[in-house]
Image (spheres, rainbow, N blue to C red):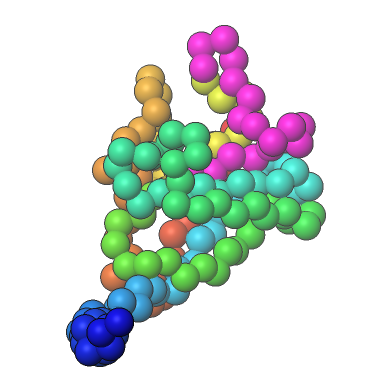
Amino acid sequence: MNVLPLCSLLIGSSFLGAAVPAARPIETSSVTVVVSSLVSTTAYVRLYFYNTREGFLKSGKWAFSKSVKPMGKSEFTLPIDLPRGEWAVAITQDLNNNDKVDKNFLGIPTEPYAFSNNVHPTIAAPGFDECKFTVDEPGKVVSIVLKD
């Protein structure tokens, strides 16, 4: 067995590994989401955070979600760190705790909901561009009023 080619391969591969740059950490900024006018002071509120147009309002396509129990209050504040970029938030309040957004036969939600920028759709669900906000520096406040 010739040892020289094996040593060359091992030494060469260690140099290749060193040449790969380390992944840059994702820059995040602090954002405060304020949700007011809750219909129930006990039913969970679910916040769905989206960062793509293609996935906006599609089940399971959110970047992440959070559930908040209002603890007897009609308003709450959620501090969160978000990667810099464009974001949109959709909110629902699950009044009957069945872990879904109840809708009527036309597909219109029968439980309270809201969107960032306080977009109030009349005929169709809003688009990402209507609801988006930009996270580019710390201290951003996003206020959302829940629609009954």
Q: Quadrant of residue 18?
A: bottom left
Residue 51, position as x, y percentages in the image: 35, 52
Q: Is residue 18 above or below residue 123?
A: below
Residue 22, position as x, y percentages in the image: 29, 81
* Residue under the image location 54 percent in, 59 percent down: 34
Residue at far front of view: 1
Classify residue 70 as left or right of residue 79: right
Quarter placement of the C terminus: top right
Quarter placement of the N terminus: bottom left
Frontmost residue, 43 versus 97:
97
Classify residue 81 as left or right of residue 105: left
Frontmost residue, 15 versus 141:
15
Q: Quadrant of residue 20?
A: bottom left
Residue at far top of view: 105
Q: How many marks?
A: 0
Classify residue 103 as left or right of residue 49: right
Frontmost residue, 123 versus 54:
54
* Residue under the image location 56 percent in, 25 percent down: 109
Residue 38, position as x, y percentages in the image: 65, 45
**Can see residue 145?**
no
Residue 7, position as x, y percentages in the image: 27, 89
* Residue under the image location 35 percent in, 73 percent down: 26
Q: Quadrant of residue 75?
A: bottom right
Q: Is residue 89 above or below residue 31?
A: above
**Can see residue 136?**
yes
Q: What secondary structure is the stretch in magenta mostly built from?
A: loop
Magenta segment, which residues?
89-107
* Residue under the image location 32 percent in, 67 percent down: 84
**Residue 75 is covered by the magenta coloring:** no
